[in-house]
Amino acid sequence: MDINQFYSRPNEKPLDRILADGGFCGIFRTIGCIGDSLSSGEFESFENGVKGYHDYFDYAWGQYIARATGANVYNFSRGGMTAKQYWESFAEQRGFWAEDKLCQAYIVALGANDLFGQKQEIGSAADVDLENCDNNALTFAGYYAKIIQRLKSMQPKARFFIMSMPHDDDAEKNAMKDRHAALLYELAALFDFTYVLDFARYAPVYDKAFKRNFYLGGHLNAAGYLLTGRMVSSYIDYIIRNNPEDFTQVGFIGTPFHNSTAKW
């Protein structure tokens, strides 16, 4: 057995090793995926000149992670979702703030509809009031942080993995995706146990070849969702291997216990 494969490795990039079983992402028993259509297994139909959009949650990348790791993964998502809508109505209407839905880890993948669809102001970490989220500015940054702040008030030791958007062939959109990624690093610096899954930097470019293999219309196909699940869980495995002290007490998240000799 080569134990070194389970340690951090010099010069390794987050997606150098894609794991079918999710690796150490499997240490989490409950994971919540907060996102939009690409978190919801959305397929795009086209019949008689009319497009249709259909959320098939069994095909969501989060459910591929669930099947690979054995974790219970919740889809706190819907096609078209924005941080503003999630905060103002969706989560409450669906009961997603309920205590029985609290998770050990959250993967947040929001921004596409906010910034490209709604053209919302992106904002910055300066829009966040760490003492009272009701004072956050009404920007993408402000709403995004509100979601994290509320969940942290309920599950203080949960780990948060916040996702940037992969590049494609559109240079103008890529520039905004880079601004989005930079904002996520700002937000991660505000909160403990919060990590960026930087797909803008480390994921493959979603170019014509990628879309021929992994897209159906403007959304992923089944193989694309499976691949995304492996990329997300492998990135989390990389983070855990490179920050083992941050994850030694994952088993105590959501319990009244901890070990005072380790990071908590």
Image (tube, rainbow, N blue to C red):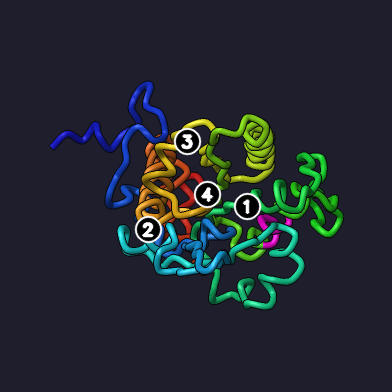
In this view, 79 is above or below 217: below
**The disc labelled 1 sits on which kind of residue?**
Leu
Q: Are marks 1 and 4 in contact (CB under 8 Å)?
A: no
Foreground tag (1 vs 4) = 1
Which type of secondary structure does the marked residue at label 2 adopt?
Answer: helix
User: Mark 3 or 2 closer to N-term?
Assistant: 3
- Residue drawn at x 73%, y 64% is 85
**Residue 207 disc label:** 3
Q: Residue furthest left?
A: 1
Foreground tag (3 vs 2) = 3
**Residue 110 disc label:** 1
**The disc labelled 3 sits on which kind of residue?**
Asp
Q: Residue furthest front?
A: 48
Rounded to the nearest angstrom, the CA distance separating label 1 from label 4 is 28 Å
Foreground tag (1 vs 2) = 2
**Residue 146 disc label:** none
Q: Main secondary structure of the magenta part?
A: helix
Residue 200 point in image, percent of width and height: 55, 35
Which type of secondary structure does the marked residue at label 1 adopt?
Answer: loop
User: Mark 1 or 3 closer to N-term?
Assistant: 1
Q: Is residue 179 visible to us here?
A: yes
Residues drawn in magenta: 146-150
Rounded to the nearest angstrom, the CA distance separating label 2 from label 4 is 38 Å
Foreground tag (4 vs 3) = 3
Would residue 162 be found to the left or right of residue 259 on screen? right
Question: Neighbour class for label 4 at 10 Å: few (<14), some, many (≥20)?
Answer: some
